[in-house]
Amino acid sequence: NIFNAQNRARTDINFDMTALARYEPEPGSLYEFGYSRKTRSPNLYERYTWPVAGPFTAMFNWFGDGNGYTGNLNLKPEVAHNVAFTGAWRDMSGENNWEARISPFYTYVENYIDGARTGGTFNTFPVANSYIFQIMQFRNFNAELYGVDGSGRVKLHESPEYGRLQAVGVVSFVYGRNLDIGNPQYCLPGNGLCSVASFLIKKGDGLWNLMPANARIALEHQIGGLSMAAETQLVAPKDHVSANKGEFTTPAYALLNLRAAYDWSNMRIDLGVDNVTNALYSLPLGGFDLTNYSRNAFLFGRNAGLASVRQVPGMGRNFYAGLTVRF
């Protein structure tokens, strides 16, 4: 075949580098600025997967998107250029009352390896509102990511009688897009002309599987060997997605988690409850839940299966316990 007739030997010459500048104008304040170059060569699947038919391409998928992928011998290594700044501050009064940290970043990726639609699908006669599995080929594009991470802590109370009470917070935001791929989200299933036109008209399709803006806010209490915490996890809607891959959007959600631990001598006991309210939510990074698809496709046909594809749901109320012994 065509693949076997080609010269398949490939040699990549890669190099990475990092540079970091640090400035501490006074005790309690620290600023860092860094640059890094990171290179990744295509893996074996991305370069040497040769099937192009739907049932066979489906075997080569580690994205969790249900699509099928075929390789590309002409892929170049990815090169990511990252610049980041960090500012960190902490209380220097001797009481350790507070600390804060913020880290914005920007990354530009040359030859980003992503999937491009070949025009083939797994479903020739889709029904209304069904999901269409695409056949994709790995190709090189340009992409960018930017965002910010932040964390902080503030002491609310501390005394020998009542112990230490503090509030802790962590926030994260990242936005990524493929600068070369169009956004075919408004194209009807199977409308290849519309998909091609979208590549020419509107660039900047979302990158696959990026976490939306999220935060964790916790109230922590410690007295002696006993520590307890009540934590709220807040996740924003995920609406900037990879329409090219058919990625689902997910709604916002909030979870309440409780945990406690007791530490003494060489032992530690942990107890906790995650998702106390048993909230139903979709995992933004969970990928596609193909359970209903497999069942309904087997019982009622492929179209019925495709119509039931959904995002993997998050875990319900979960109790856990742990024992740690140190020797």
Image (cartoon, helix red, strand yellow):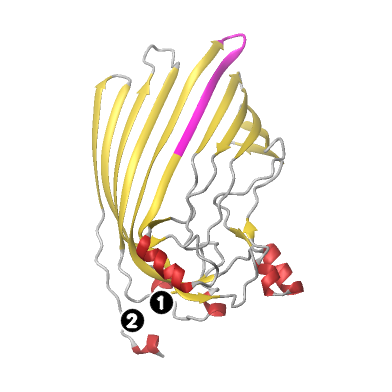
Residue 96 position (above or below residue 122): above
Q: Amino acid at mark 2?
A: Arg
Q: Nearer the viewer, residue 317 or 142?
A: 142
Q: Nearer the viewer, residue 223 or 289?
A: 289
Q: Residue furthest right?
A: 299
Residue 204 position (above or below residue 5): above
* Percent position of residue 112, x then y: 35, 61
* Percent position of residue 172, x then y: 46, 38
Q: Amino acid at mark 1?
A: Tyr
Residue 318: name its quadrant: top right
* Percent position of residue 11, x then y: 27, 73
The magenta stretch is 159-172
Taking the spot 50% from the left edge, 17% from the top edge, the residue there is 155
* Percent position of residue 195, x then y: 45, 68
Residue under pointer 2: 8
Residue 48 is labelled as: 1
